[in-house]
Amino acid sequence: VRAEFIIGLLTYQGEGHDDSLVEQLHEEQMAHGDLALVNAREATKDPYRGDPKCTGEKILAWFQQVVVLHRTTRFFLKADWDTWIHTTRLEHTLRTLLATRQGPLYFGNTLWCSYSLRNFQPCGYGFGPLQAAGAKKVECPLLPGGGDAVGPYPY
């Protein structure tokens, strides 16, 4: 079992982090080796929203990276800080699925989101395309540049 913390190498504006943060990340990686540094933006801190919104870039970049760096690993699990995982049940379920399938397997929930074309900021989240399309109509036009939002797309 290995745990990694996914860190985007770009700010939410798409710029590199300042030198002091890069140094801290380097020191953390040298001390613990538990960072997955990916070429993606961190969550947006849009002033028009009360909470940070994930762009989905980090998780996509991590999946692209992890299947190369850890190609002999049988299972990958992505979870947030507030996720409880019943590992015994999960292992049983995954082994049962693997016994009946060959090749890659995705097992989980897929979130959908729209993006502003002007600044690629996320808006209109939902679990499934219909829920996200409804959220796009309500949420996206309230944001600067949100009227030109495209999507929703799975991530």
Image: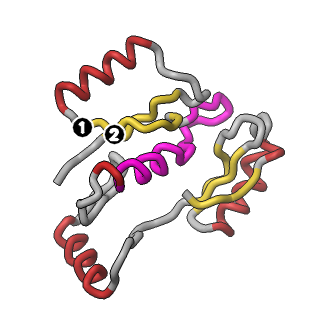
Q: Quadrant of the C terminus?
A: bottom right
The residue most toward the bottom is: 100
Residue 17 x, y percent position in the rendering:
48, 20
Residue depicted at 68% across the width and 52% down the height: 114
Task: Determine which of the numbered discs, if any, sits on residue 36 in the image.
Answer: 2
Is residue 41 shown left or right of residue 87?
A: right
Give percent across and percent down for residue 142: 77, 41
Judge left or right: residue 100 versus residue 130.
Answer: left
Instruction: Tell me the amino acid under the disc marked 1.
Output: Asp
Q: Is residue 5 magenta?
A: no
Quadrant location of the N terminus in the rendered image: bottom left
Task: Please say if 3 is above or below 16.
Answer: below
Kindly indicate the quadrant of the structure image that contains residue 102: bottom left
126 left or right, relative to 107: right
The verdict on residue 64 being magenta is: yes
As measured in the structure, the alpha-carbon distance from the residue carrying label 1 to the one carrying label 2 is 7 Å
Badge 1: residue crowd in 10 Å (few <14, some 14–19, many ≥20): some
Q: Name the residue under label 1.
A: 34
Q: Indicate the secondary structure of the residue bearing disc 2.
A: strand
Residue 13's tag is none
- Viewer-side residue, 121 vs 132: 121
User: Is residue 44 positioned above or below 78 on the image?
Assistant: above
Q: Give the range drawn in magenta.
A: 44-67
For label 1, the SS is loop
Residue closer to the observer: 16 or 134: 16
Q: Count the marks: how many?
A: 2
